[in-house]
Amino acid sequence: MYDFISIGALIGMARYICPIAVFLKPMSYFSLIRIKCDKEKCISCGKCKRICPMNVDVTDNSRKRENGTECILCMECVKNCPKNAL
Ligand code: SF4
Ligand code: SF4
């Protein structure tokens, strides 16, 4: 059964059932380690958001980015950005 479910999807589902997330979320809001987007290079293709298992809008550099506290630093967005903007 798990052959058909990607690792990213499993990690994405874990955020709804893991109690540790309750404590980690507020800490991640203030984290110094964050993926940042170079707006000069970004072409707004949306690939980073489509590939992110946590649905983070990594192109938004503000602390209020969509699902920003969900980032698990898997680096999939960085690896797949066609413009090396992350
Ligand atoms: S994948 Fe790269 S170029 Fe595309 S929207 Fe994301 S940061 Fe911008
Ligand atoms: S590092 Fe992973 S979880 Fe974080 S924004 Fe990039 S793809 Fe999403």
Image (spheres, helix red, strand yellow):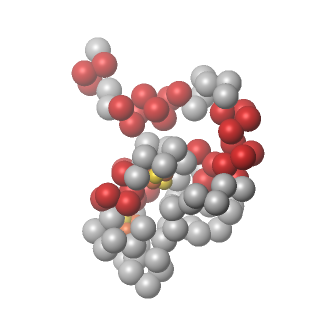
Q: Which of these two is toward me, 3 or 78?
A: 78
The percent position of residue 69, horizontal first and vertical second, equals 63, 48
> Which residue occupies 72% across, 33% down?
22
Image coordinates for residue 29, horizontal then vertical, percent? 70, 53
Q: Is residue 12 left or right of residue 69?
A: left
Q: Can you tell which quarter of the image residue 17 is in?
A: top right
Judge whether 43 appears above or below 50 on screen.
below
Residue that protrudes farthest toward the left in the picture: 3
What residue occupies the far top of the structure in this picture?
Answer: 1
Q: In which quarter of the image is residue 30?
A: bottom right
* The furthest residue to the bottom: 40
Residue 19 shows up from this direction: yes
Please provide percent x and percent y for residue 40.
44, 85
Count of marks placed on residues: 0
Q: Judge left or right: residue 51 versus residue 57.
A: left
**At 65% from the left edge and 68% from the top edge, which residue is drawn?**
62
Residue at 32 percent across and 32 percent down: it is 6
What residue do we see at 66% from left, 55% from top?
A: 31
Q: In this view, does 74 lie above or below 80?
A: above
Q: Which quadrant is home to the C terminus?
A: bottom left
Q: Does the rendering let one see residue 66?
A: no
Q: If the image is split into quadrants, where does the N terminus sit?
A: top left
Q: Quadrant of residue 84?
A: bottom left
